[in-house]
Image: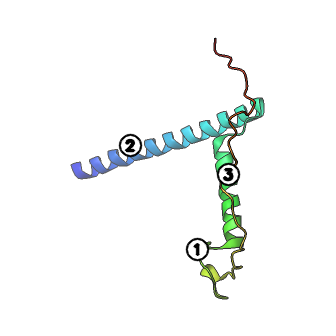
């Protein structure tokens, strides 16, 4: 008998916790939307969703970048294009000249 009462109480606590999470999420959505409308600054979850969808779209077009010569049957049934041979320049080296003009020192 006491076992059933404990189960009911734990289930009620779980239900209250779940409803609290739903109310907090709804309040967050309302506040974020109002802030978006008033300030024009997008909420972070909008940036996250747009980056995620762009990443999925790029993955669908390019596939795994690590494969050199993929076959016609790529992962998930999509064909892949071979990687291009474009070179990426990370740093461009330039000569440092000692007599180059410098900005004036504003520290006083």
Query: Disc 1 marks which residue?
Result: 66
| Among the two numbered marks 1 and 2 on one chain, the one whose residue lies closer to the N terminus | 2
In the image, 65 versus 63, the foreground residue is: 65
| Among the two numbered marks 3 and 2 on one chain, the one whose residue lies closer to the N terminus | 2
In the image, 42 versus 28, the foreground residue is: 42
Q: Is residue 77 above or below residue 39?
A: below
Q: Are the two marked residues, 3 and 1, in contact with CB atoms closer than 8 angstroms? A: no
Q: Is residue 36 above or below residue 78?
A: above
Camera sees residue 1: no
Q: Are the two marked residues, 1 and 2, in contact with CB atoms closer than 8 angstroms? A: no
**Residue at the top extreme?**
108
Report how far apart the C-alphas of labels 3 and 2 lie in the structure.
64 Å
- Label of residue 92 in the image: none
10 Å crowding of disc 1: few (<14), some (14-19), many (20+):
few
Give the label, 1 or 2, closer to the camera. Answer: 1
Camera sees residue 90: yes
Query: Disc 2 marks which residue?
Result: 13
Report how far apart the C-alphas of labels 3 and 1 lie in the structure.
28 Å
10 Å crowding of disc 3: few (<14), some (14-19), many (20+):
few
Name the element at disc 2. Answer: helix
Report how far apart the C-alphas of labels 1 and 2 lie in the structure.
49 Å
Name the element at disc 3. Answer: loop
- Label of residue 93 in the image: 3
Q: Is residue 102 above or below residue 82?
A: above
């Amino acid at each position: 008998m006491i076992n059933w009462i404990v189960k009911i109480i734990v289930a009620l606590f779980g239900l209250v916790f779940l409803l609290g999470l739903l109310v907090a999420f709804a309040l967050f959505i309302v506040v974020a939307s109002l802030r978006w409308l008033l300030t024009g600054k997008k909420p972070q979850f909008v940036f996250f969703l747009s980056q995620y969808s762009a990443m999925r779209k790029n993955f669908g077009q390019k596939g795994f970048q690590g494969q050199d010569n993929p076959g016609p049957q790529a992962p998930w049934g999509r064909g892949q294009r071979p990687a291009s041979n474009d070179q990426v320049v990370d740093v461009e080296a330039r000569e440092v000249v000692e007599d180059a003009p410098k900005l004036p020192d504003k520290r006083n």
